[in-house]
Amino acid sequence: MNVVVNKARHPQLANYIHSSIFALLPYIQKGLMERVVVIFYGQDQVPLEKFVFKLTIGQSYQSSVSEAELEFALRAFLVKLNVSETIAKPLPSGANWEITANFRELPSQENEGEEAKLWVPTDTKQWMQPSEITPIKSMDSNPLKLQLYMEHPSVTEQKV
């Protein structure tokens, strides 16, 4: 695609990211996935910010969009990710993060087999007030629709 992207340098981190996303692939292909969320936490395990990738894959795949057009749209989407650095605030010392997935419906072990055991419900604390959303980029190229936005606590939530 000829797009410069940042990559994790630490082999275990790179492996964690790769295996997490690769494990989601069957659910994305079947249309069961709604969002992939990267959540950054403070020391109290309360989310500081969330990067939300909302995606929809058209199940018909009978689109007239060429591979080159889809590649061009993905390239524009990926380039925009570099700008998101300026939106995010610096994380405090001791912050951590995780990758979570929001499903349209929970995968059943009967239908999905061993793959369904890889994902467990999260115990992520939620904000008490509705979050503020900062849109970053959206793309609509059949069969792929993709939105990226950032969620952060509302001003009233930050003061509590």
Image (cartoon, rainbow, N blue to C red):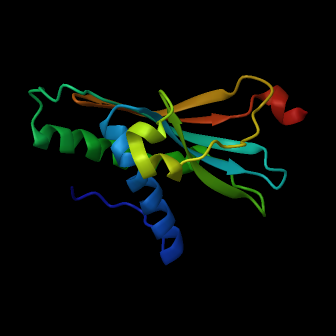
Say which quarter of the image contains residue 27: top left
In the drawing, does residue 1 fall left or right of residue 134?
left
Q: At x 42% / y 61%, what residue is drawn?
A: 18
Closer to the camera in the image, 43 or 159: 43
At which x and y percent is residue 46? 78, 44
Say which quarter of the image contains residue 30: top left
Q: At x 48% / y 60%, what residue is drawn?
A: 17
- Position of the C terminus, as image quadrant, is top right
Closer to the camera in the image, 81 or 63: 63
At which x and y percent is residue 153? 74, 33
* Residue that extends furthest to the right in the rendered view of this protein: 160
Closer to the camera in the image, 52 or 98: 98
Count of picture labels: 0
Q: At x 58% / y 43%, what residue is drawn?
A: 87
Say which quarter of the image contains residue 126: top right
> 118 above or below 29?
below
- Position of the N terminus, as image quadrant, is bottom left
Closer to the camera in the image, 42 or 78: 42
> 13 above or below 83?
below
At which x and y percent is residue 131? 69, 27
At which x and y percent is residue 98? 61, 53
> 1 above or below 54?
below
